[in-house]
Amino acid sequence: TYIYGAMLSVAAGKTSLAYVQTRDKYGNNIRVHPDDTDADGPDAVVFELCTEVGDVSDEVQLALDPSCRGGEKELSVSIEILYSVGPDGNSENAATGEPYYGLYSVVFFPFLSRQYMPRAKHNAVYLKCYFDGNADPGADQVS
């Protein structure tokens, strides 16, 4: 799972966009819509703007799930997460005709002028791949 979008240009009073492409445990893009009845549970995507990122261990992170990995989370921000909305604003990819499976659009608007570190989690695990830019970097870049 990886995120791309406005990673380096977050500014107060300005709407920013990011996209989280979820992947399965084998690294493949998820090809079905979320299912609340799935035995493994539905996908949970969380986005945070942090003013400080902590360094709690992976075990503590999974057990307690502190915001910003134990750092400081910015609370003066509006965040909306939408499922299956692509960079073109549609629910289907015009090039392929397929739905944007596993893609989450994150619309966020910080109210205070500070330095922020965007962080995202997929099923309580922080993402490790962040790309600044509005285009999906593709599978070749994310392996």
Image (cartoon, rainbow, N blue to C red):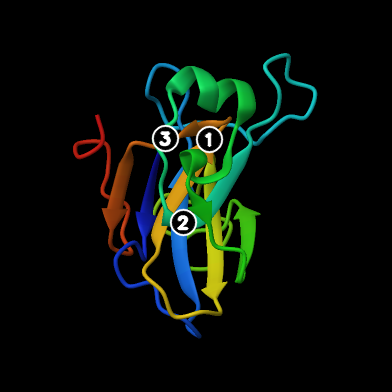
Q: Residue furthest left?
A: 140
Check the picture and name the quadrant holding the C terminus: top left
Q: Residue at x 56, y 44 (%)?
A: 67
Local crowd size for mark 2, using a 10 Å CA cut-off: few (<14), some (14–19), many (≥20)? many
Task: Residue 122: give its label.
Answer: 1
**Residue 117 showing in the rendered view:** yes
Q: Horizontal and vertical percent for residue 12?
A: 46, 81
* Residue identifier under label 3: 1
Q: Secondary structure at mark 2?
A: strand
Q: CA distance from mark 1 to mark 3?
A: 7 Å
Foreground mark, 1 or 2, reads 2
Q: Horizontal and vertical percent for residue 62?
A: 56, 23
Q: Nearer the viewer, residue 80 or 70?
A: 70
- Of pointers 1 and 2, the one earlier in the residue sequence: 2
* Residue identifier under label 2: 50
Query: In the picture, residue 123 is in which quadrant?
Result: top right
Q: Horizontal and vertical percent for residue 39?
A: 73, 14
Whether label 1 touches label 3, CB < 8 Å = yes
Q: Horizontal and vertical percent for residue 135?
A: 31, 59
Q: Residue at x 42, y 41 (%)?
A: 54
Q: Residue furthest bottom?
A: 13
Foreground mark, 1 or 3, reads 1
Which three-letter amino acid code belongs to the residue tagged 3?
A: Thr
Q: Nearer the viewer, residue 85 or 7?
A: 7
- Of pointers 1 and 3, the one earlier in the residue sequence: 3
Q: Residue furthest right?
A: 37
Which three-letter amino acid code belongs to the residue tagged 2?
A: Cys
Check the picture and name the quadrant holding the N terminus: top left
Query: In the picture, residue 44 is in which quadrant?
Result: top right
Whether label 1 touches label 2, CB < 8 Å = no
Q: Residue at x 31, y 48 (%)?
A: 130
